[in-house]
């Protein structure tokens, strides 16, 4: 069995399909999706349809991202936040305006079923953004932190690897899990374009919403695969590059 973790997609269905085709999946393989399936490129509906198809065929774990939580709120109450619209939500609203109510209802079930995080038998944590409680996700008070936190990654990239694990200066959050896999914070912000590890945190968000590719990494071997830069699949669109 191979286990793959996939970064933020942001409506880039064509890149997702291309990437999955490179993995040569077997029925026993497991897929972890870290969230942010929507908001950016013009195919959020096709992206969600494809994820539903993958879940029916493979052992697939689908996590909630902050953009997915915003779409869920919009589908439930019909109110669109202006800030969300300017950060990719407008493309999602436009796409859903073209589909039937039955399709929206099916996707509403999809968003409602997304997990806030996943902890496997090897004490590896999969989460969209991060957590703040030093004792781990089970002690976190607000679930939305799992979708919005950036402090975990900011701590990881500023961490001094010379600090020993038994030092009082060693970040206690890192001691909770053997490995942590996140998206949410695009790696182009630190000049990286491939899955990147800092401390015991792996970031898989290689900037698919902007100028980067979509990435998948085999969790055990750390081999990775990438689509082309996602904007190349959508030459007439800006994605989230317009703010």
Image (cartoon, helix red, strand yellow):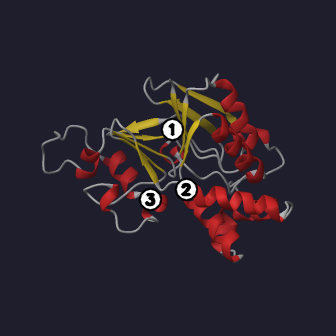
What residue sits 81% from the left and 61% below the top?
102
- Residue 65 position in % (x across, y down): 55, 56
Front position in the image: 153 or 18 = 18
Residue 192: which disc? Answer: 1
Callout in the foreground (1, 3): 3
Marks 1 and 3, how far apart at CA: 23 Å
- Helix, strand or loop status at disc 2: loop
Placement of 23 over or under 176, stated as above or below? above
Mark 3 sits on what residue? 146
Residue 141 located left or right of residue 223: left
Which badge, 1 or 3, comes first in the chain's sequence?
Answer: 3
What residue sits 68% from the left and 54% below the top?
241
Callout in the foreground (2, 1): 2
Quadrant containing the C terminus in the rendered view: bottom right
What residue sits 62% from the left and 58% below the top?
111
Marks 2 and 3, how far apart at CA: 8 Å
């Amino acid at each position: 069995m191979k286990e793959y973790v996939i970064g933020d997609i942001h409506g880039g269905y064509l890149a997702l399909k291309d990437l999955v085709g490179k993995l040569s999946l077997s029925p026993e393989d497991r897929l972890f999706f870290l969230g942010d399936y929507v908001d950016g490129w013009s195919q959020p509906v096709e992206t969600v349809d494809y994820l539903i198809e993958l879940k029916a065929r493979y052992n697939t774990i689908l996590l909630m991202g902050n953009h997915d939580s915003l779409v869920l709120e919009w589908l439930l109450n019909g109110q669109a936040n202006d800030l969300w619209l300017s950060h990719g939500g407008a493309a999602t609203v436009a796409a859903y305006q073209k589909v039937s109510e039955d399709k929206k209802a099916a996707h509403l079930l999809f968003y409602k079923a997304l997990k806030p995080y996943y902890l496997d038998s090897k004490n590896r944590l999969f989460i969209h953004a991060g957590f703040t409680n030093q004792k781990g996700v089970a002690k976190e008070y607000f679930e939305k932190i799992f979708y919005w936190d950036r402090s975990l990654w900011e701590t990881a990239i500023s961490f001094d690897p010379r600090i020993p694990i038994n030092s009082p200066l060693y970040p206690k959050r890192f001691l909770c899990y053997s490995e942590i896999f996140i998206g949410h914070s695009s790696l182009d912000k630190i000049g990286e374009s491939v899955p990147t590890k800092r401390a015991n945190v792996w970031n898989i968000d290689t900037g698919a919403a902007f100028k980067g590719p979509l990435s998948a990494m085999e969790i055990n071997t750390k081999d990775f695969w990438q689509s082309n830069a996602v904007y190349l699949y959508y030459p007439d669109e800006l994605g989230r590059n317009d703010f």
